[in-house]
Amino acid sequence: MKLVLLSSKMLAVAFFSLLLFSCGKDKPAADEYGIYFKLNGTQMNFPEFDRATHNEMGGNHALTISAEKASVGPSINLVSDQNDFTTGKVYVVDVPAIGGKNMMEYYPVYNDYDNGWNTLPPDGQEAKLIVRITEANDVFVKGTFEAFLFQHNGSTEKSLVTDGRFYVRYPH
């Protein structure tokens, strides 16, 4: 009788431990590589193929932050007249120094570019993209972001990106 009771207790502890540790996986840990955000309140996770890419052309610099899941995912493109993608920097949509724009894009369906989303608003809509680099070095870039996304198909529908964070590596 004691053995059966002890086994029942161990099974109950194991079950509740499993339940406890499996909860909350919608929101990955802050130290997981990838891009994570809420799109209109729904958690979006892109933990695969994380990458940061820096390019320089004509004296201007670009940092692309991207990740995927099942061949789809978001990218954030930051531009600057200096190579200053460093800890503590904050980027918004307009870049007056070069007459360009920082942008986030998201394609929820592979190869369906007409129904993609980006931060370039249709006429009369407000643009929003705020990217904060919280940690950066020659191995990775980490930060947070929020944005409004608009569909490429001409719709005026606006989606809200909140609780965005990224932790992506430069290629080795």
Image (spheres, grey):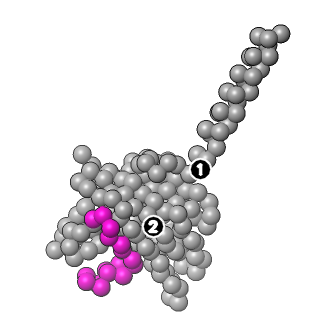
Magenta run includes residue 98: yes
Residue 94 versus residue 42 in the image, above or below? below
Disc assigned to residue 145: 2
Query: Which residue, as the protein is rendered here, is positioned at the far left?
Result: 59
Disc assigned to residue 26: 1
- Residue 165 is situated, as x and y percent measured from the top left of the image, at 45, 60
Going by the numbered disc 1, the residue's amino acid type is Asp
Q: Residues within 10 Å of mark 2 (few under 14, many from 20)?
A: many
Taking the spot 26% from the left edge, 56% from the top edge, the residue there is 137
Taking the spot 72% from the left edge, 23% from the top edge, the residue there is 11
Front residue (pair 35, 72): 35
Quadrant of the snapshot with the N terminus: top right
Taking the spot 45% from the left edge, 67% from the top edge, the residue there is 145
Q: Which residues are magenta?
A: 86-101
Going by the numbered disc 2, the residue's amino acid type is Phe
- Residue 106 is situated, as x and y percent measured from the top left of the image, at 48, 64
Magenta run includes residue 116: no
